[in-house]
Amino acid sequence: MASSNTGVGDPAAAVKATPAQAGAGKVSAATYGAIEASEVGTPMWLARIPPKLAQAWESAPEGTVLGTLTFTKGSAPAGAGKQSGRGMKGGGSRPPPLLPNRPGTIQQSLTVRVSEAFSQELSDLPLDYSAEAITKKVPVLHPFTRRADGSVVLHGTVQRSCNLQMLRTDQYRQMCRNRLVASVSSDRFVKPVDQVDLSARSRPVGSSAARGGK
């Protein structure tokens, strides 16, 4: 997972520019609005990420390693591979029940570990996330890049989407504490005032004007 300004996915999969496109890069009637769809068949994911992580990744220089993606295989469900003695209608067998809270089971997960280089600038940035709400029901979306000559390059087709959710780690708790402290902190201060200053400020304007006219 690396930072790239050419689109979503593997930077190595970016479409190479032809000599004519890599020339002056001027907008012309032939190049403006032209669509290059040679890589439109490349499958891609659409991930919704927290704003703080998005800002950190957006400000990273091109070529920066953003993090690692880990897929963990889960344990087989209880009773997997065993045929039930009671048949269902049509000769089928009842599927084994899923017991996610069974002791010793490992849950299937898809996690993202952000590079620790980002924690040097943002100490309270959570580094561990899990992909949740994974779905295949997405509209037709194509990540693209608009070149300087006005042409558009399609890098692939989004086939799945997910949300990156923060894991409850020490960095996450530190971020929550910082938010709580910032919400209750105030820049207001109290300045003591003498009794003489109070009497001078509370003097009626009409009486002072009358004294000045005598």
Image (spheres, rainbow, N blue to C red):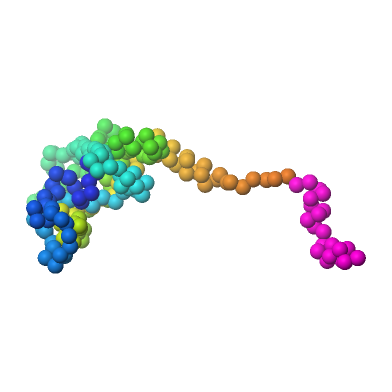
Magenta region: 193-214
Q: Position of residue 197 (x, y in %)?
A: 79, 50
Residue 53 lies left or right of residue 18; in this view the side is right
Residue at the extreme front: 24
129 in relation to 17, above or below: above
Count of numbered badges drawn on the protein: 0
- The residue that appears at 21% across and 39% down in the rendered structure is 71
Residue 168 lies left or right of residue 188; in this view the side is left
Q: Position of residue 115 (x, y in %)?
A: 29, 36
Front one among 14 and 73? 14
Q: Where is residue 24 in the image (x, y as percent from the top left)?
A: 15, 56
Observer able to see residue 73: yes
- The residue that appears at 86% across and 63% down in the rendered structure is 212
- The residue that appears at 45% across and 42% down in the rendered structure is 176
Residue at the extreme right: 214
Observer able to see residue 140: no
Identify the image quadrant of the C terminus. Answer: bottom right
